[in-house]
Image (cartoon, rainbow, N blue to C red):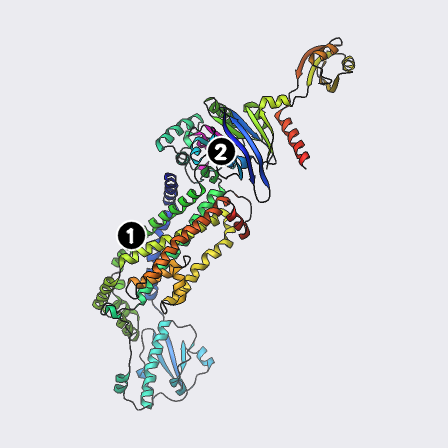
Amino acid sequence: MAHLRAEHIHKRYRDHRALDDVSIQVPERSIFGLLGPNGAGKTSLIRIINQITGPDEGRVLINGRPITREDIAIIGYLPEERGLYKKMKVGEQAIYLARLKGMSKSEARKKLRIWFDRFGILEWWSKPIEDLSKGMAQKVQFITTVLHEPELLILDEPFSGFDPINAELIKSEILRLRDEGATVMLSTHNMGSVEEICDDMALINKGKVILEGKVKEVKDRFKEEVYDVFFTGEVLGFTNALWTGFELLTKETTSDKMTKARVRMLDGNHVNELMEAIMPHVKVNEVKEVIPSMNDIFIKVVTNSTQDNG
Amino acid sequence: MDKVWLIISREYSTRVRKKSFLIMTLLGPLLFVGFMAAAFFLTQSDERSYQVVLTDAEGLFGKVLFMEEFENSDFVKFNFYPGSMTDEEFKEGPYDLKVDVVKEAIYSQNLNIFYKDHPSFKIQKHISAQLEQNFEKVKLADNQVSKETYESIKTKINLRPLDIDKVGATDLDPEIGWALGFILAMIIYIFIFLYGAQVMRGVMEEKSSRIVEVIISSVKPFQLMLGKIVGVAAVGLTQFLLWIVLSSVLFSTAQLIMGDAIADPSTLVNQQMSPEVASEMQAEWAGGNEAMKEFFKLYHQTNVPFILGMFLFYFLGGYLLYGSLFAAVGSAVDSESDTQQFMIPLVMPLVFAFIVAETAITNPDGAAVFWTSIIPFTSPVVMMIKVGMMGMGFQEMDYFSLTISMLLLVLGFIGTTWLAARIYRVGILMYGKKVSYKELWKWLRYY
């Protein structure tokens, strides 16, 4: 069942159309990646889901019913533009933000201690934010986002501003939160992290959804029947064997006389036919299907859709 | 609603705990009392004495004027110079001031006094008093009137307006009521700008530190704005209260230290003024007992709860009206330097109100005063002055315009808050855009 659903969202600003009939579904207890180039409309959509702005048309459903102001208590939102009160002390500020979300003071204090301890930042409790580095402040902000144990987490670019070690920490925390039952929606430019942690995704460009589905399925959809073949033996014989029904894309010889060739299947051929054709000529070590990376898919889809439109 | 409380209490507690708040709270009364003391000591300080030379080109002295009848004081010494003195001679000579005494001068209203260093008002006052006295004698002699006759026909009238409905109640100067109103209006004015600017800066801080988006994902922008405005108002009231308490403590301490000087005007008068001026002033003070009586009379005829209530109402009403507009300005800009163009229209109405307020004393029922006292943008100043006059019984209670004025102020601040909220909710999420009035107008029409 979809935990969060946005249906036919339209949002127009005076000079441009930010969202044009956007619909997405975020399944329960999963991580959903909202992708798209800069200015695609990701933040507009996220702000509408958080009820910071309203849509011109369309609606947002949470657990199957239209979202209301009361739902903010079950949402944790980390905006792209991070910020905290610079002069306020870390602990005090975290408690304030937690209370705005409806937590009691004592409960907030108790949970903050646990989180601060886990992140190893307990000693920052009484420091003003302005004394913290950017990465440190981001950690505090992440904690304030998830502290009230929201069932729906909306994270806009959660990894930006973190060094690789801390990005890894945040990544594992996001996975842990999902395993504990939260639904996570995140927007990111970091395609590697999408492949690693996202279950589902939607790609927006120029205010429209141009690609969506399970990450695995999307990647499968973009498979092009291309295989990498690793072999030893006559390269000429190999090339001749591929005369019909296959296309040799690239080939390179690696150190120990091993050759790696990238081959595309033609005429509905399959690996079996490929093997039959080449086995008499060379010794095959490994055959591996080439699965496109999210990065490749992103660039391809966005470039195509931009060309179609423009 | 409890979230608004949470915001109010954060705004309040972070501001009250700031060092600048503590410093301002302590410094305010110190500065106030310090200025009073400085002014006091400056007037007390030794003034240099001036040598005045009276030149006698027409040989009047010895016949109608007599040098010995000019009284010297600690600061003014009169000297006689026979014949006329050229400018060069005056410049070279030992005298500081020069008056050419000629017959024509005696009969004219204006008299030139040449100086090397500009004489103070007090010095001038002494010289003119001496000249008047002696010139009068010349005129009396010219007209063959005796001094006694002259004294008996010399008339001075102090008009005391008495309300026919309250005969016996009012025999004081209505200026006191006006002055009270003016001081209260001034406090409102200062408060609006001091704390309005704080609201504006607070909004800008939230905007530039980007925390605003986190907060408005938890509360409505309107709640955040309202919480800030109310929180800052509470800070202002606290500071105001502390100022009153500290000032009165400091003032009574200062009085103890400096002794009678401040408390008793007669010592002040005797020490530093010429007898002529002193007697005039003393007449004005009318002695200690008389002054106390007047004061109690004043106190009894003053409707303190009315004035206090109205003050609080216009104080808060005016602040709320302008405070929300300050919040809107803060939300629309990225930096303090961009605020200028939006500040002018906020300052103008109140400055205009003070100009009108000046006329309230001479023409309290005029059209200008009436309209500005009911229009919400000027009423906190102009109506306060009327309140001062009404509350002290110098003016008929004008329930009609008071009701309209209060009603319009309430509607006014609801209106500006609504207007400001529409600008605010767009402005706080808008970065890197130099905003014009045209742009603000667009924001108002977003839904």
- Nearer the observer, disc 1 or disc 2? 2
In the image: residue A156, left or right of residue A87: right
Q: Quadrant of residue B161?
A: bottom left
Q: Is residue A154 above or below residue B149?
A: above
Q: Is residue A230 above or below residue A294?
A: above
Residue under numbered circle 1: B245
Residue A113 screen position, x and y as percent: 39, 28
Q: Residues within 10 Å of mark 1 (few under 14, many from 20)?
A: few
Residue B118 screen position, x and y as percent: 42, 72
Residue A281 in sight = yes
Please tell me the numbered disc located at residue A78. 2
Residue A44 screen position, x and y as percent: 54, 37
Q: How far apart are the alpha carbons under marks 1 and 2?
A: 46 Å
Residue type at mark 2 is Leu
* In-front residue for pair A166/B88: A166
Q: Is residue B101 above or below residue B1?
A: below
Q: Is residue B36 above or below residue B115?
A: above
